[in-house]
Image (cartoon, rainbow, N blue to C red):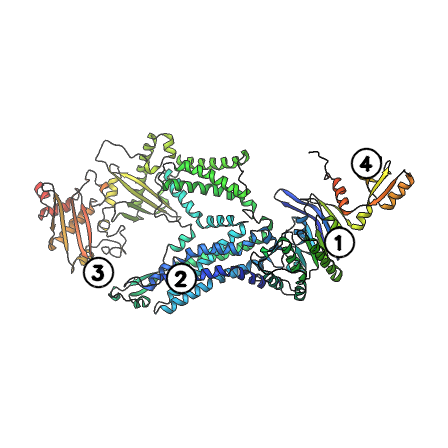
């Protein structure tokens, strides 16, 4: 007698193959067409590796859909009582049946991957590794989604349930992110989530990053539109691989673990659940609460998308709708409205309302939490003013400045909170909280981000309004008046990102001068001529540049060169600025570095006046 | 030997089987009867290894059925709602069964084609009776040691009913196949069964050989009172003539009646259908005389 205990059953395999071959064929055709369609010469400077790079982040989306369809078909026998009972009564083991379906499912993607990869490998005359990268990314992403789809199939008793669980597992993170960002954070003053990305959403994790960066050699870009160079990748110098494939590999490993989990659950699954929404009735309350909450968040999203100012009411309406819809699906009947069923809904709504109210009342102590200086490893201060607006520091005085600033901001916030009506204080958005009202129209406000990196590795990040009449402003101005900030090309004075700082991260006048020498040098000083209402621009003579930089550095030392307007109270509209021009060898156009001269930049203004560049200051003197 | 010992099964909070025991002797034809919702299908799904009992055991020749594909290969099962893949033809299912069952008899398959003259095309397009014939065709060819049939002749025409039952009985006679049949057609069941189990509310109400069952319950028509010492399952009267259903053997009742010497009496054997009706009447499942 043949063994009936292996993980592969040829009888099941033959039957399955015959039933689902058309879907496999469709996928194969789709992948091949997608690959051949996407790798076509678009313009004279395009290259095949660039197209393949984009394709690597597209195929996971196809696999997301295909895996769900495939699992529905392969595992569909579990959803019909007749077929489910037959499956359990036939002389096959569950392991044998499941193993066969898994193997066939995995095999179903191989023809498409191999054919498209083979075609690419034949077409490419260089960088053939990219074809392998595409094949790997297709296969690995499929493994993950197939695992999730199988798990969803085993945990449910019908197709609606399967799609529901598959959707939650794949896109639940979106709702979590939204709840965090749009429902809770606005209730907490100062909470700031920078660069929000839906990291808990697998498909986003897969397509967010390219597998490699294509580095072009500009000299080799053909000037004529010829198609032949496309697959030759003539203009491509080299590829810089990212950890994209490792991320996909991690997802694939997770997918394999999930397949194992699905097998384990299948053994515990009762065949009588066929047709029900869930295979494990004990999980029904969890799903009921989850779907209620997710539907509430979805309604909140709709409210936000249409700009309706009723986010919280919509949240609760959505919760009720989600709860009853889920109850209907679970009970397989529409008549679910009863006093008994109302009790859990009320409980869900009350707990949600309680959580929101407690957050709005700051019962969790998040708003006024200030770290102990001894716990802080590093602090990052960021003003939202464009260039040179970020300081990373581990110096105790900078940590103390951050804490002092936060303390002052929060003291001020307490005062504001005291003036707001109770309901608005709890449920009102802190983003739209009333600003400091003052009769002094010389007071301005701006944004400041504080990020503490604690010694235990955790981070605390806050975003606050700061006002020009705050006591901490003078210290902040000094902190942001360093030459590294003033002469920074980018938003952060990172030594690797700017050419004017040395290896120690310190500004080097010589490096700046080196960039200016030998290239076209221009230094203009402009000022507002109120009489003629026109800009006057004057070129700084080459021999004056060194002195000018010295004057700027003196202002930096005295803490007056900060480029952020909030740090210069009463000086809203400075018309004076310096523009440093230079040619960057990496770019085909001229770079410009602007330095605004506020009224308290006395050394620089004096220097310009003395040399006759600034007639107004000279006249005033 | 097909056996269920103290099996209990819950579906949520509903108890479908309550400490149920069932014994089907090897080579016998066992009729499983009971009212609607008694748990017959649940019993059958346990015997075929579909359901796993919450407690108790289900065995074939001493081996637990659930999860044992080698035992399941020896069991032929024809459910009320027969199994086939959605788009499968008879030939597809033939290949599938042949790959799955090592004892599949291809010669018998060809032979049975003369009896079951089934059309080509997808089985789902067959009538209900034809689908049932297809199931018999395939299942008999697997050469099962145990054949479990749930409403086997439902949907079959009278000729095919006889044909199918004769095939089953021939298999019993030839190979000693053990057969369990669940049916509401007690007249037909009476013709083929040698053992009967009556199920009610998930419990085995009565399980005996048909001969014992018919020998232990009799119908007495008598002018006057029934003799003492017998349990009366049912009582009716028409004029002076009383009809009693008594638990007792034919000779015992006959002897007592002769001793009483009433003006008229007659002791009659009961059909399976009558036993079923009167046994269940004893547990409050009876025909109610309701005037509409």
* Image location of residue A254, percent across then percent down: 47, 56
The local crowd at label 2, few if under 14, some if 14 to 19, many if 20 or more residues have their Cα within 10 Å, is some
- Which residue carries the number 1 mark? B192
Numbered badge on residue B237: 4
Q: Which chain does the residue under circle 2 lie in?
A: A
The local crowd at label 1, few if under 14, some if 14 to 19, many if 20 or more residues have their Cα within 10 Å, is some
Answer yes or no: are tags 4 and 2 on the same subunit. Answer: no
In the image shown, does B256 or B13 lie closer to the viewer?
A: B256
Element marked by disc 2: helix
Q: Nearer the viewer, mark 1 or mark 2?
A: 1
- The answer to the question of whether label 3 and label 1 lie on touching residues, with beta carbons closer than 8 A, is no
Q: Alpha carbon of mark 2 to alpha carbon of mark 3: how far?
A: 42 Å
- Which residue carries the number 2 mark? A33
The local crowd at label 3, few if under 14, some if 14 to 19, many if 20 or more residues have their Cα within 10 Å, is few
Q: Quadrant of residue B77?
A: bottom right
Answer yes or no: are tags 2 and 3 on the same subunit. Answer: yes
Q: Alpha carbon of mark 3 to alpha carbon of mark 1: how far?
A: 100 Å
Q: Nearer the viewer, mark 4 or mark 3?
A: 4
Q: Which chain does the residue under circle 1 lie in?
A: B
Q: Nearer the viewer, mark 4 or mark 1?
A: 4
Q: Alpha carbon of mark 4 to alpha carbon of mark 1: how far?
A: 33 Å
Q: Quadrant of the C terminus of chain B?
A: top right
- Which residue carries the number 3 mark? A585
In the image shown, does A202 or A476 lie closer to the viewer?
A: A202
- The answer to the question of whether label 4 and label 1 lie on touching residues, with beta carbons closer than 8 A, is no
Q: Quadrant of the N terminus of chain B?
A: bottom right
Answer yes or no: are tags 3 and 1 on the same subunit. Answer: no
Q: Nearer the viewer, mark 2 or mark 3?
A: 2
For image coordinates 50% across by 42% down, the residue present is A326
Q: Left or right? Give the position of A495 relative to A326.
A: left
Q: Which chain does the residue under circle 4 lie in?
A: B
């Amino acid at each position: 007698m043949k063994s009936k205990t292996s993980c592969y059953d040829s009888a099941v395999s033959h039957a399955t193959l015959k039933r689902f071959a058309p879907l496999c064929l469709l996928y194969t055709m789709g992948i091949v067409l997608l690959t051949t369609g996407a790798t076509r010469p678009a313009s004279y400077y395009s290259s095949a590796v660039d197209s393949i790079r984009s394709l690597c982040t597209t195929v996971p989306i196809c696999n997301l859909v295909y895996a769900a369809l495939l699992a529905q078909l392969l595992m569909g026998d579990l959803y019909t009582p007749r077929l489910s009972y037959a499956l359990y009564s036939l002389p096959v083991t569950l392991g044998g049946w499941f193993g066969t379906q898994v193997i066939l499912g995995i095999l179903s993607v191989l023809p498409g991957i191999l054919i498209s990869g083979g075609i690419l490998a034949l077409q490419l005359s260089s960088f053939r590794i990219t074809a392998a990268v595409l094949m790997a990314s297709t296969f690995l992403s499929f493994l993950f989604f197939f695992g999730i789809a199988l798990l969803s199939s085993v945990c449910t008793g019908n197709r609606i349930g399967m799609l529901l669980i598959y959707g939650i597992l794949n896109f639940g993170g979106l709702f979590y992110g939204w709840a965090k960002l749009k429902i809770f954070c606005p209730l907490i003053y100062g909470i700031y989530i920078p660069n929000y990305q839906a990291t808990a959403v697998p498909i986003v994790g897969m397509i967010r990053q390219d597998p490699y960066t294509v580095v072009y050699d500009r000299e080799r870009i053909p000037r004529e539109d010829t198609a032949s160079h496309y697959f030759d990748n003539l203009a491509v110098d080299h590829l810089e691989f990212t950890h994209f494939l490792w991320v996909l590999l991690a997802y694939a490993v997770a997918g394999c673990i999930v397949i194992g989990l699905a097998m384990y659950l299948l053994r515990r699954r009762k065949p009588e659940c066929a047709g029900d929404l869930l295979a494990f009735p004990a999980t029904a309350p969890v799903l009921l609460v989850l779907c209620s909450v997710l539907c509430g968040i979805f309604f909140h999203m709709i409210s936000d998308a249409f700009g309706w100012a009723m986010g919280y009411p919509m949240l609760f309406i959505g919760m009720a709708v989600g709860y009853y819809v889920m109850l209907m699906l679970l009970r397989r009947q529409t008549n679910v409205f009863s006093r008994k069923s109302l009790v859990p809904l009320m409980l869900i709504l009350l707990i949600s309302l309680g959580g929101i109210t407690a957050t709005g009342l700051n019962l969790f102590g998040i708003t006024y939490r200030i770290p102990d200086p001894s716990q802080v490893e590093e602090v990052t201060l960021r003003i939202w003013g464009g260039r040179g607006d970020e300081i990373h520091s581990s110096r105790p005085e900078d940590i103390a400045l951050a804490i002092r600033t936060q303390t002052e901001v929060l003291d001020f916030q307490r005062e504001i909170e005291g003036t707001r009506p109770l309901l608005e204080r709890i449920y009102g958005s802190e983003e739209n909280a009333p600003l400091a009202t003052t009769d002094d129209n010389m007071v301005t406000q701006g944004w400041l981000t504080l990020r503490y990196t604690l010694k235990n590795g955790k981070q605390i990040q806050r975003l606050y309004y700061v006002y020009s009449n705050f006591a901490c402003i003078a210290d902040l101005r000094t902190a942001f008046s360093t030459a590294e900030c003033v002469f920074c090309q980018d938003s952060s004075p990172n030594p690797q990102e700017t050419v004017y700082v040395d290896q120690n991260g310190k500004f080097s006048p010589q490096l700046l001068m080196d960039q200016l020498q030998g290239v076209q040098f221009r230094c203009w000083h402009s000022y507002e001529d109120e009489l003629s209402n026109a800009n006057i621009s004057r070129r700084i003579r080459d021999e004056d540049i060194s002195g000018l930089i010295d004057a700027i550095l003196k202002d930096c030392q005295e803490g007056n060169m900060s480029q952020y307007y909030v740090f210069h109270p009463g000086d809203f509209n400075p018309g004076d600025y310096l523009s440093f021009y230079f040619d960057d060898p990496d770019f085909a156009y001229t770079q410009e570095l602007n330095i605004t001269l506020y009224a308290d930049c006395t050394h620089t203004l004096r220097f310009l006046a003395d040399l006759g560049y600034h007639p107004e200051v000279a006249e005033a003197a | 030997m097909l056996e269920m010992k103290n099996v209990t099964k819950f579906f949520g909070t509903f108890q479908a089987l309550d400490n149920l025991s069932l014994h089907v002797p090897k080579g016998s034809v066992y009729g499983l009867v009971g009212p609607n919702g008694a748990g017959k299908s649940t019993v059958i799904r346990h015997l075929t290894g579909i359901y796993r009992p919450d407690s108790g055991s289900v065995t074939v020749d001493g081996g637990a059925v659930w999860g044992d594909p080698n035992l399941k290969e020896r069991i032929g099962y024809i459910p009320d709602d027969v199994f086939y893949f959605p788009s499968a033809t008879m030939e597809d299912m033939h290949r599938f069964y042949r790959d799955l069952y090592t004892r599949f008899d291809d010669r018998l398959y060809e032979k049975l084609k003369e009896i079951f003259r089934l059309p080509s095309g997808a089985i789902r397009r067959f009538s209900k009776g034809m689908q049932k014939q297809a199931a018999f065709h395939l299942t008999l060819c697997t050469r099962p040691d145990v054949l479990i049939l749930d409403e086997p002749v439902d949907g079959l025409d009278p000729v095919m009913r006889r044909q199918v039952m004769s095939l089953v009985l021939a298999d019993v006679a030839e190979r000693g196949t053990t057969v369990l049949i669940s049916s509401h057609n007690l007249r037909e069941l009476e013709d083929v069964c040698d053992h009967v189990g009556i199920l009610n509310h998930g419990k085995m109400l009565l399980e005996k050989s048909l001969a014992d069952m018919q020998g232990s319950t009799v119908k007495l028509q008598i002018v006057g009172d029934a003799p003492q010492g017998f349990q009366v399952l049912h009582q009716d009267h028409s004029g002076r003539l009383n009809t009693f259903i008594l638990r007792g053997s034919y000779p015992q009742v006959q002897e007592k009646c002769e001793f009483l010497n009433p003006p008229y009496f007659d002791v009659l054997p009961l059909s399976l259908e009558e036993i079923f009706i009167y046994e269940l009447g004893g547990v409050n499942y009876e025909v109610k005389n309701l005037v509409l």
